[in-house]
Amino acid sequence: MDEFLTISPLIKQALADGGPVVALESTVITHGLPYPQNVETALAMEAAVREGGAIPATIAVLRGQITVGLSLDDIERLGRLAGATTVRKCSRRDLAIAMARGEDGATTVAGTVVVAHMAGIELFATGGIGGVHRGHPFDISADLRELGQTPVTVVSSGAKSILDLPATREVLETEGVTVVGYGVDKVPAFFARSSGLPVDVQLDTPEAVATLIRARQQLGLASGTLVTVPIPEEFSMDPEEAEAAAAQAAREADEAGIHGPASTPWLLARVVELTDGRSMLANTALLRNNGRVAGEIAVALSKGKEGIGAD
Ligand code: PSU
Ligand code: MN
């Protein structure tokens, strides 16, 4: 494996054996949630991946070293840096900067997809992907382009509801990303269970998703798969409350002149305030749930691999 990638021994072994591994991002730790909820959630997500039967691989840049499989201490250290400006938010374009300067970097969905693919990890679980910002049709998260050009499967609850969901859905189509509804025929809206927008295909089991991934792999397509999983009913927010908070936060961000990479973290934090913390509860619940589902899909996919190997 390329030496600029540090992969933990456990994960390296699992990958060599074709075992189930699920990548996890680190921007949600440093830029998505406050301390200590960020560390608790990151660890709960790792536990959820294990519950699903797979090995979690949280990814970040640690002092310039791209690392696959953070230790507890690494997660705690990054978690304490939440809100600090010293951790670079690393999308595709930022990885080389963090590496060259020896910085700490938290990988976004795009950054994590890049590294997961380099490491040979197919599954990646997160909360919500980036997308097209409301009122800013040219502020399109690099997450969408990344999914269009890198063959990785991202399990999420759709795009964050602070975004323009119909526009985001259109760009996913343009980028050639297959959008799967896991047990649903509409794309979830992050805190709420449905955006009303159609998925490309509804699949109801980990095995069905694994079969789709295998077909894409056989075709040799460069583009990825987005598996959208609705937030568990008991944690879902009232869609009107979620929408009102998202709309207000987007308005305030415009008034305050917040833009660029600062936009998403700012909006998420503001929505937590506007919903008295309910959105954070919902966010952590869906993150855990997506970790478990991704773990189950990784297991189904690795079983298929054994079958192919035995031929
Ligand atoms: N979803 C969350 N919290 C987050 C993010 C997503 O619930 O912090 C992060 C992801 O890392 C995602 C990034 O890739 O926000 C998108 O940022 P941008 O819009 O600048 O591409
Ligand atoms: Mn942006």
Image (spheres, grey):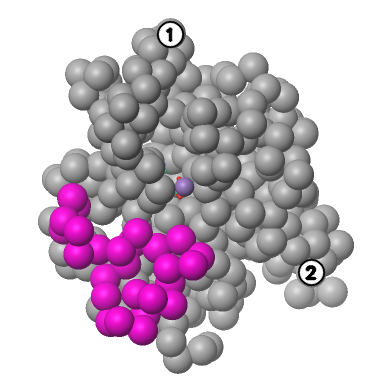
Amino acid identity at mark 2: Ile
Q: In this view, does 61 lie to the left or right of 224?
A: left
User: What residue lies at 38% left-to-right and 76% top-to-bottom?
Assistant: 97
The answer to whether residue 127 shows anywhere in this view is: yes
Q: Which of marks 1 and 2 is nearer the N terminus?
A: 1
Q: Point out residue 272 in the picture as x, y percentages from the top left corner.
A: 25, 27
Magenta highlight range: 81-106
Q: What element carries label 1?
A: helix
Whether residue 191 is situated above or below residue 11 in the rendered picture = above
Q: Is residue 298 left or right of residue 269?
A: right
Q: Point out residue 86 in the picture as x, y percentages from the top left corner.
A: 20, 64
Q: What element carries label 2?
A: helix
On whether residue 90 falls in the magenta region, the answer is yes
Total count of labels: 2
User: What residue lies at 79% left-to-right and 69% top-to-bottom?
Assistant: 308
Amino acid identity at mark 1: Glu
Whether residue 144 is situated above or below residue 64 in the rendered picture = above
Instruction: Quickly name the residue at label 1.
Output: 240
Numbered label attached to residue 30: none
Q: How crowded is mark 2: few (under 14 residues within 10 Å), some or many (20 or more)?
A: few
Whether residue 225 is situated above or below residue 203 in the rendered picture = below
Whether residue 66 is situated above or below residue 144 in the rendered picture = below
Q: For the view shown, which residue lies furthest in the bottom direction? A: 3
Instruction: Quickly name the residue at label 2.
Output: 308
User: What residue lies at 66% left-to-right and 63% top-to-bottom?
Assistant: 150
Q: Nearer the viewer, residue 238 or 9?
A: 238
On whether residue 110 falls in the magenta region, the answer is no
